[in-house]
Image (cartoon, rainbow, N blue to C red):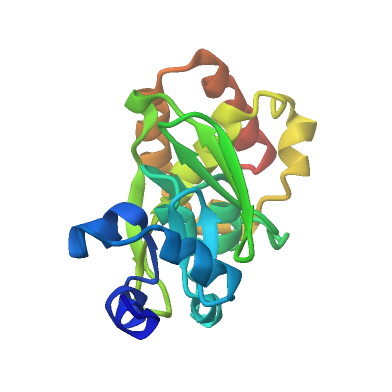
Amino acid sequence: MDFLTFRERMCPLGCFNINQVLLWERDFDRSNLTRWCRKGLLVKLRNEYYAFPEFKQAPDAARFVANRIYSPSYISLHSALSFYGMIPEEVVQITSVTTLKTAKFQNTFGTFHYQNLKTNLYFGYEIKTLPGGRGVLFATPEKALLDLLYLNPYYKTEDDMENLRLDEDYMQNELDWDRLADFTEKIGSKALDNRVAKMIKVYNI
C-alpha cells in the first residue's frame, strides 16, 4: 500500500490505532507504520496509536488525543478546572481519569497523565465540541472538582483549599452547587464530604 492512499483514508480520524487500520485493510503490513514513522510521515503516540504530524496544528489536537490513546477516559482534574477558568494556572500536562490503571504517556503532542477511578465513580462527564469541531469528553466543572479532591487526599485543610486558588466569582455564580451535592452524595465518601465542607467554608458559599 502506498502512503498517499493510507493517508487519504486515515487522516480524517485525527489519530488512530492499528485495529482501525486492520478493519479497513485486513492484510495491512504493520512494518509500514514503523517505516513511515522513521521517515517522519507518521507520529507514534503510544504503542499501536499514531497520528499524522500535521494534526498537531489542529485546534485542541492534544485534548482529542488524550481521549483516544487511553480509553475509557475523560479530561478532569487540573486540566478541566483550567479549561473552565476555575483556576488561574495554565496546565502543561493533560490530566484525565480512567477506569484503567494509572498511566502516563509522552509524545510530540504533549504529556498525558491518567489517574485510576473506580468504575462506580466514573460518571459526571459530557462531550464538549471544541473549536476544531471534534468532540472531547470532559468532566463537568463539579465533577472535575470532586475528582481532584477525591483522588488527592492531601487537599484536606482550609489552607489547602485556599491554595487551590479557585476563582471565587466562578464558585459563587457559575458552579452548580445542587449538582455538586448530588455527585458528592453519589460518591459516598466521608473524607470527601469533609473536604467539600471545608471548601464551602473557605469560598463563602
Residue 95 at x, y = what percent?
58, 48
Point out the image quarter for the N terminus.
bottom left
The residue lying toward the viewer, choosing from 186 and 205, is 186
Residue 142 at x, y = what percent?
46, 45
**Residue 197 is drawn in which quadrant?**
top right
Seen from this angle, which residue lies furthest top?
190
39 is higher (above) or lower (below) than 189: below
- Residue 187 makes an appearance in the image: yes
Q: Residue at x 42, y 29 (%)?
A: 184
Asked if residue 99 lies left or right of residue 53, the reply is: left
Q: Residue at x 69, y 38 (%)?
A: 202
Q: Residue at x 50, y 71 (%)?
A: 36
Asked if residue 50 lies left or right of residue 171, the reply is: left
Q: Residue at x 61, y 42 (%)?
A: 104
Point out the image quarter for the C terminus.
top right
- Residue 174 makes an appearance in the image: no
Residue 171 at x, y = what percent?
56, 52
78 is higher (above) or lower (below) than 54: above
Report the label total.
0
The residue lying toward the viewer, choosing from 81 and 135, is 135
15 is higher (above) or lower (below) than 9: above
The residue lying toward the viewer, choosing from 21 and 65, is 21
Residue 48 at x, y = what percent?
44, 51
The residue lying toward the viewer, choosing from 79 and 172, is 79
